[in-house]
Image (cartoon, rainbow, N blue to C red):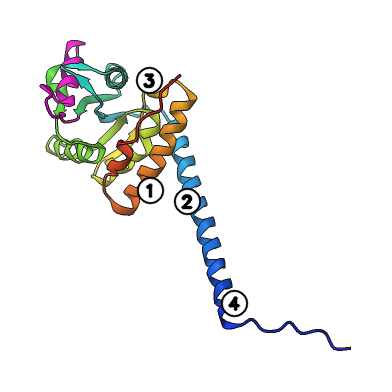
Amino acid sequence: MHGVRTPPLKPLARIRRIVLRLLFGALIVGVLVVGGTAFRVWQVARVDDWTKADLAVVLGAAQYNGVPSDVLEARLEHALGLYEAGVVGYVATTGGRQPGDNFTEGQVGKLWLVKRGVPEDRVLQVGEGADTLGSLRAVASVAKEHDLTTAVIVSDPWHSLRARTMAEDAGLHAWTSPTRSGPNVQTRETQWFYIKRETGALLYYRLMKAHAGVFDELKMPKIG
């Protein structure tokens, strides 16, 4: 008895099946890439590396007429701890100014550190850059002028992987020691929000080698 043959697919049906398979494959790859990146953001956020480095790089955050915001102050306090422990010989403070500001974030960071005992010549004020990428490229240029090659990046935990990636692309040998205090690290809601934001921003950077401004425009949901 002969088996029943399945009739061959018509060309249009065959093309439709191939397209569906390709779309499904792309979807699976996309999920794996996004999920893997989010996991790495979370994983690197947990790393606090106090290996000796030439300098600590404090990534800028808001300041108010010369007074650092709670986010910036938490980063500065952590960098101060690294300097006082002898982990770094210099601290670079970064960040430009918003329209109407009298101070750059870099200036405010330097003033804060010097007031707390860090010698002025040990604080490299880099008041350039309107975003992480611009700031780290400016730091790398200043570090090169001072023959400094290794850097520990000080920011919020969820920012660590993207900042480290950008620092290394700018020419620094970098690792991370994030702050564990401040409003950006206090609740699960803030943690999940920033993991999502950093995942998108890092994927955009790896693809375009540019800063993803749209992710900085996302607003943190109100903590209730």
User: Which of 57 and 31 lies nearest the eye of the viewer?
Assistant: 31
Quadrant holding the C terminus = top left
Residue underneath mark 3: 183
Quadrant holding the N terminus = bottom right
Report whether residue 48 is seen.
yes
Q: In the current view of this chain or complex, which residue is farthest to the bottom?
A: 2
Residue underneath mark 1: 203
Q: Earlier in the sequence, mark 4 or mark 2?
A: 4
Residues in magenta?
95-117
Q: Residues within 10 Å of mark 2 (few under 14, many from 20)?
A: some
Residue underneath mark 4: 13
Q: Secondary structure at mark 2?
A: helix
- Percent position (x, y) of residue 130? 19, 36
Disc 1 + disc 2, Cβ < 8 Å:
yes
Disc 4 + disc 2, Cβ < 8 Å:
no
Residue type at mark 1: give it.
Answer: Leu
Q: Which of labels 4 and 2 is toward the front?
A: 4
Residue type at mark 3: give it.
Answer: Pro
**Residue 33 circle label:** 2
Disc 1 + disc 4, Cβ < 8 Å:
no
